[in-house]
Amino acid sequence: MTLLDLCSYLGLGAVGAATANLLLGMLLSLRYSPVRLWPHRRINVFRLHNWTAYFALFFTLTHPLVLLFVKERHFGWFDIVFPIRSPLQPKLNMAGAGALYLVLFTVVTSLLRTSIGQRAWRNLHYLVFPAAVLLFWHSIGTDPALKDGNPDLLDGGKVFIEVCAFLSAVAIGGRVWRRGRGFRPPAGNLAKSSRGAA
């Protein structure tokens, strides 16, 4: 495995973890209960959501660092931190850097949620959506071989990213469609279940 392969795999890991995190976040925002609904098991969705965020941050941070050791194209520290003049595809790399900074900011503000307050945290947490757009734009458009900047969109890695982008779009659309309702049962069903429990 070459360093370019490692860089690509870390990028794919970032996309996979970010997609899983987004899907779990959508379920949490819709008040999904894995006990009441499928798979009818006690699963801590909130903890899974947190761990996928940490994995997404780890992969997003380590993915560009590998480029410092690649000899085919010389990437310096400035090209990693602020890649406006990176050796190849600077605009797409700026999108990737933007996604990294938004993911980092979202994770840090989530850790400080009790300090900054629930309302402020929720408003800041919406930054995950522009982060996802930047992440998918960067991931689909970049050339993993660092050759001519023309990626093969039917390559296995690119297809994986495209599927993740599609799933994320569907999840966001479902979240908007069920806004205000979520997965909570109707009020009549809640009253019946509470009477049955008594």
Image (cartoon, grey):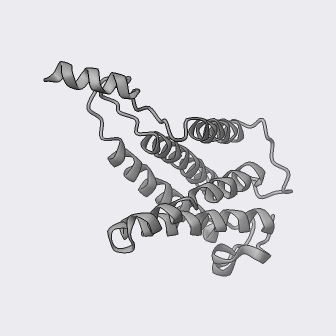
Q: Is residue 25 above or below residue 142?
A: above
Picture quarter with the C terminus: top left
Question: Residue 60: which quarter of the image?
Answer: bottom right
Nearer to me, 182 or 57: 182
Question: Residue 190: which quarter of the image?
Answer: top left
In the image: residue 51, left or right of residue 126: left
The residue at 68%/54% (across/down) is 133
The residue at 62%/71% (across/down) is 68
Where residue 151 sits in the image (x, y, percent)?
Answer: 81, 48
Nearer to me, 126 or 14: 126
- Numbered circles on residues, count: 0
Q: Is residue 113 above or below residue 52?
A: below
Task: Let me know if residue 41 appears in the view.
Answer: yes
Task: Let me know if residue 107 appears in the view.
Answer: no
Where residue 89 sits in the image (x, y, percent)?
Answer: 81, 64
Nearer to me, 181 or 106: 181
Name of the residue lying farthest toward the left: 198
Name of the residue lying farthest toward the bottom: 78
